[in-house]
Amino acid sequence: MRKLRIDEMNRLTVNEFKNAPKVPVIVVLENIRSLNNIGSIFRTADAFALEAVYLVGITAKPPHREIQKTALGATESVDWEYFEDSMKALAKLSEKNYQVFALEQAEGSVDILDISSKINKPGVAIILGNEVEGVLQSTIDVCDACVEIEQYGTKHSLNVAISGGIAIWELFKALKHWFLISN
């Protein structure tokens, strides 16, 4: 094996990325405090060619130096939109006919590994909540379902960027055929 050089990776330019087909997944960041978490989610959204990132409430917006540290330019390639509150973001997702999941530990939640069996619309949104409080109950009340990442340690929580990355990967696997068909 030999590690690939950057010029061998066939990376898209920002303009090529903007015009390329996207996986029909929107990540909603609800009241995320950490600028590093925000930047990491942008970078992950870029890596998997997701449709967009929605920023809600106190979640900071690009351009911001601290977001850029982890986003590494992904705020320029990934489409994003800001909403004052979650209900406005959810209304837009409803208009787009997107199925909405909250990533949260909740009664009746679906294991993230089973998410593909629960998707019944061609577009999906995943809501990631605040680092301390999680997804707001008022938001959960209007979601189609909650998905949960099984955990076995003492903390019962993961960093937002880590849990978001796991959820994005599982959604990508479930919906990548939309992307592959378009390419």
Image (cartoon, helix red, strand yellow):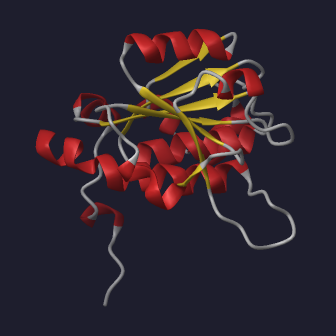
Task: Give the answer, above or below, for where 121 lies relative to 91.
Answer: below
In which quadrant of the rendered view does residue 99 lie? top left
Residue under the point 65% across and 64% down: 150
Q: Is residue 142 visible?
A: yes
Label count reads: 0
In which quadrant of the rendered view does residue 71 lie? top right
**137 or 63, which is in the foreground?**
137
Q: Is residue 61 visible?
A: no
**Is 3 on the left-hand or right-hand side of 138?**
left
Task: Give the answer, above or below, for where 72 lies relative to 21.
Answer: below
Residue 90 screen position, x and y as percent? 55, 16
**103 or 76, which is in the foreground?**
103
Residue 9 screen position, x and y as percent? 28, 62
Q: Quadrant of the C terminus?
A: top left
Task: Give the answer, above or below, for where 181 lies relative to 152.
Answer: above
Q: Quadrant of the N terminus?
A: bottom left
Residue 97 screen position, x and y as percent? 36, 19
**Is 132 on the left-hand or right-hand side of 168?**
right
Tell which residue pokes out farthest to the bottom in this image.
1
Residue under the point 80% across and 73% down: 153
**Is 126 on the left-hand or right-hand side of 19?**
right
**42 or 167, which is in the foreground?**
167
Residue 31 screen position, x and y as percent? 75, 27
Residue under the point 34% across and 35% down: 14
